[in-house]
Each structure stands twice: as structure tokens, then as C-alpha cells.
Image: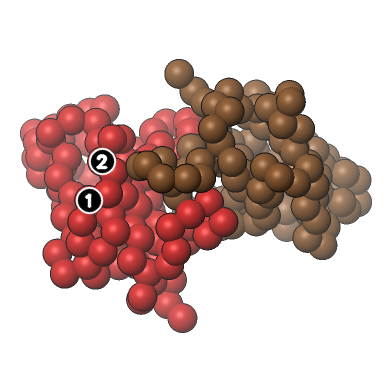
Amino acid sequence: DQQVKQNSPSLSVQEGRISILNCDYTNSMFDYFLWYKKYPAEGPTFLISISSIKDKNEDGRFTVFLNKSAKHLSLHIVPSQPGDSAVYFCAASGYGGGTSYGKLTFGQGTILTVHP
Amino acid sequence: EAGVTQFPSHSVIEKGQTVTLRCDPISGHDNLYWYRRVMGKEIKFLLHFVKESKQDESGMPNNRFLAERTGGTYSTLKVQPAELEDSGVYFCASSQVRGGNSPLHFGNGTRLTVT
């Protein structure tokens, strides 16, 4: 039972264009969503996050959109650069008490390749 | 500030052997997590320490896995005896504050191969 899903295993984009990575979740108790970026042989590094009380968060070239009714979020990278080529993981966590607080549930990841 | 460090970076062992993975979190981070990624799939939660206490170990696969964090500093994850399906990349992460708005800082992982 996978609660966070990234249905696109890979995405290829031309440099300068927009990259859109998608993520769906099933657990309505998730209250915070994060994107992590991972290069080969390295650990995931935090990229950007969004709280469920918002529908958009922007940080430079990166914007995350959240559609709570559809249980869907997306990461937009504009403009895409070759250095953005990596695996991108969507993750979710739940607020409140209980053991789920602070624990992340990840998707399978999407391999982004940005061609020069 | 030093990041999360993990040792070894890679371990190859035979089925039935024992392996111990080590994680040194960022200094001052009370929260320490272990995750695992198997065969390019999702990164799965194993357990969570707050200082030296196990807060949540719901993701531990079975009793062949033992995690400790004596003194609330570094942590070890022992697999004994190892099975083929234990192969994967084991990530450790830490955070100062427990909560969704406190991103986890990950180490580079230990790639475990069980043959």
C-alpha cells in the first residue's frame, strides 16, 4: 500500500524549458509535503516544501503546487538546467501527535534529465 | 557544520553474516532516522530515535534488524543474520526539531550487498 506515488519514472527536458514533476498521495492525514533531490552516490537533499494550508510555495527557480482536493502536488523547475539532472523524490509527513509526526513517506522517485 | 556521516559507504557480505552500519548525526540533532531504499524503489522508513529512545520502529522489517543509539549521539544498525533481500542502500537522517516543517538532513548512505 503505497501512500505516495510518483507515476513517472523518468522525465527528459531541454535546457531552459520547464520541468514538471508530479506526485499523488492517498493519506488525507498528510499535512506537510517536501521535495528532495538526489545525485548518484549521495543522500537526498532537501529542495522545497509546502504546508497543507498553502497551495503554492516558490523558491527561486523551484515552485511547488499543492491541490488538496485532488491529493496531488507538483514541482516546477523554470528554467531547467543540466545541473538539475538528478532523482527527485516527493515526500509527505503528518502533523500532530503520534508516531507519524516527523516521519517521511517517500515516493519512488523520478529521474530528471536536462539536456544541454 | 559537518553533515550526517555514515560508515561504511559500501559493504558486501555473504548471506548469514552480520553487518553493522554506523551513523553520526549532525551535532545537536536529537532526532535520528534510518531509512532504506531497495532496488531503486521508494525510500522506506525504518525507525526514529529521539535522543537515545526509540520513538517509532514500525518500519523495521523483522527481528534480524537491531538499532541502537547509546548516549543519544551516534547510532548503529545491525543486521544479523543477513538475507539476500536485505540488500539496498541504508540512509540515516537527522533533524533538530521533530516535525514536518523541519527537513531531514540525510547522509550519503551505506550500500549493502548480500550475496
Residue B87, position in %: x, y? 29, 35
Residue B83, position in %: x, y? 18, 30
Q: Residue A67 carries which label?
A: none
Q: Is mark 2 on a helix, strand or loop?
A: loop
Q: In this view, does B3 lie to the left or right of A35?
A: left
Q: Specify the quadrant of the image occupied by residue B18.
A: top left
| Quarter of the image where the N terminus of chain A is located | top left
Residue B41, position in %: x, y? 47, 31
User: Disc 1 to disc 2, how far (Cα)?
Assistant: 7 Å
Question: Subunit of mark 1?
Answer: B
Dot 1 and dot 2 within a common chain:
yes
Q: Specify the quadrant of the image occupied by residue B22.
A: bottom left
- B59 relative to B22, above or below: above
Question: Subunit of mark 2?
Answer: B
Q: Is residue B20 left or right of residue B108?
A: left
Colour that chain A carries in the picture: brown
Q: What element carries label 1?
A: strand
Please indicate, yes or no, whether residue B43 appears anywhere in the rendered image.
Answer: yes
Colour that chain B carries in the picture: red
State the residue in front, A19 or A68: A68
Please indicate, yes or no, whether residue B76 appears anywhere in the rendered image.
Answer: no
In the rendered structure, are the residues bearing label 1 and label 2 in contact, judged by CB atoms less than 8 Å apart? Answer: yes
Residue at the far bottom: name it. B1
**Badge 1 is on which residue?**
B54
Residue at the image position 52 percent from the left and 60 percent from the top: B102
Residue at the image position 26 percent from the left and 27 percent from the top: B85
**Badge 2 is on which residue?**
B57
Residue type at the position of mark 1: Lys
Residue at the far top: name it. A1
Residue type at the position of mark 2: Glu
Mark 2 closeness class: few <14, some 14–19, many ≥20 residues within 10 Å: some
